[in-house]
């Protein structure tokens, strides 16, 4: 089971206040529902590939409305032949959709109702329903941090994004070929969203993985930085030793001023030493890193001048 499926499974087990659960039901029906006309009656079909979500929709409908509903199972015929679960309502469809502010008469509302957007708890429940209906979140162990909620309608998607940002989640909107997506990329904000919709256990797992990943990345950065510095030291040291050896083989190190000669001798004796370490080893007294670097540059310049004469 994927991490996103684990999150949704946890959400379907939550006990929620009846009025708040109604907001969750509104999101599920708005996003996964379809209305058809049969024998001059409106039929509501709410479809999902997740059995736990189907059972939750069926229960929420039973809890809130005195209507006959069915839970059907169909086999998907194309691509992956997964089961499709359909919650069907044959009588009372218009009453349900009107009560949930999805329709007004025969007109469809593309926006989330003010009743929900002006109540924090109902917004939380609506976002939970929206995530159950069209949400996904990457497995933090295997990929980059990403959580999204898909919606067919631009107005509705913007409402979802606005509700996320009401809680400071820094959500953004992007248009896809077949709809719109409200998404979050920051790990901390994804964890906040999971808490917001009630997925506490999933949030703990997410945070555990994130802490381990961040620690591993920090260690890798430190190691890479140290390797880069070591490589830089070795490259510089090789250039310095090459210049010193040229001077020694041509005219001898005794021709160098005393301060340059002692640095040259230490560099050849300790090729892997840092400039700070060489400065501390000088018999005449310690010299700063910049001082040692200045002397080595003089040695290289002397070597270049000598090469031109030779």
Image (tube, rainbow, N blue to C red):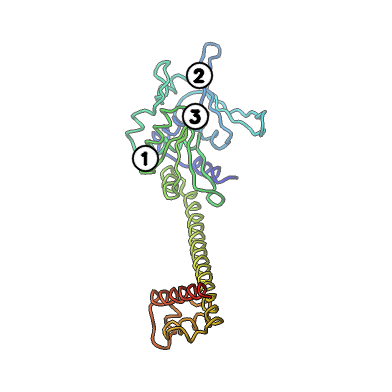
Q: CA distance from mark 2 to mark 3?
A: 30 Å
Q: Earlier in the sequence, mark 1 or mark 3?
A: 1
Residue 13: x and y in percent read 50, 42
Q: CA distance from mark 2 to mark 1?
A: 37 Å
Q: Secondary structure at mark 3?
A: strand
Report crowding for label 3: few under 14, some 14 to 19, many 20 or more residues within 10 A (C-alpha): few
Residue 279: x and y in percent read 42, 80
Query: In the image, is residue 137 above or below residue 282?
Result: above
Q: Secondary structure at mark 2?
A: loop
The part of the image, by quadrant, that contains residue 108 is top left
Q: Nearer the viewer, mark 2 or mark 1?
A: 1
Question: Are the two marked residues, 2 and 1, in contact with CB atoms closer than 8 angstroms?
Answer: no
Residue at the far front: name it. Answer: 309
Report crowding for label 1: few under 14, some 14 to 19, many 20 or more residues within 10 A (C-alpha): few
**Residue receiving disc 3:** 179
**Residue receiving disc 2:** 91
Q: Earlier in the sequence, mark 2 or mark 3?
A: 2
**Rendered-image quadrant of the C terminus:** bottom right
Q: CA distance from mark 1 to mark 3?
A: 20 Å
Query: In the image, is residue 263 above or below residue 149?
Result: below
Q: Secondary structure at mark 1?
A: helix
**Residue receiving disc 1:** 165
Task: Say which of 29 and 131 sits in front.
Answer: 131
């Amino acid at each position: 089971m994927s991490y996103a499926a684990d999150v949704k499974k946890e959400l379907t087990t939550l006990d929620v206040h009846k009025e708040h659960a109604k907001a969750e039901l509104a999101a599920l029906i708005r996003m996964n529902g379809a209305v058809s006309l049969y024998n001059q009656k409106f039929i509501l079909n709410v479809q999902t590939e997740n059995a736990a979500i189907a059972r939750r929709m069926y229960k929420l409908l039973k809890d809130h409305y005195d209507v006959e509903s069915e839970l059907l199972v169909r086999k998907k015929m194309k691509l992956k032949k997964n089961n499709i679960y359909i919650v069907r309502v044959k009588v009372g469809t218009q009453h349900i959709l009107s009560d949930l502010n999805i329709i007004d008469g025969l007109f469809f509302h593309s926006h989330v109702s003010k009743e929900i957007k002006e109540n924090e708890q109902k917004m939380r429940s609506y976002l939970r329903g929206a995530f159950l209906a069209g949400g996904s979140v990457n497995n933090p162990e295997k990929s980059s941090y990403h959580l999204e909620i898909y919606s067919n309608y631009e107005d509705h998607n913007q409402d979802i994004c606005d509700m996320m940002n009401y809680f400071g989640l820094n959500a953004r909107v992007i248009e896809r070929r077949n709809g719109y997506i409200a998404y979050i990329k920051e790990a901390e904000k994804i964890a906040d969203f999971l808490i917001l919709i009630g997925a506490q256990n999933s949030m703990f797992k997410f945070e555990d993985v994130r802490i381990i990943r961040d620690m591993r990345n920090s260690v890798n950065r430190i190691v890479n930085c140290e390797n880069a510095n070591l490589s830089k030291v070795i490259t510089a040291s090789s250039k310095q030793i090459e210049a010193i050896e040229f001077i020694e083989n041509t005219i001898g190190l005794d021709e160098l001023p005393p301060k340059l000669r002692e640095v040259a001798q230490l560099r050849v004796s300790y090729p892997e030493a840092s400039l700070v370490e060489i400065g501390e080893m000088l018999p005449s007294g310690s010299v700063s890193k910049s001082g040692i670097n200045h002397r080595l540059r003089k040695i290289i310049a002397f070597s270049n001048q000598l090469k031109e004469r030779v």
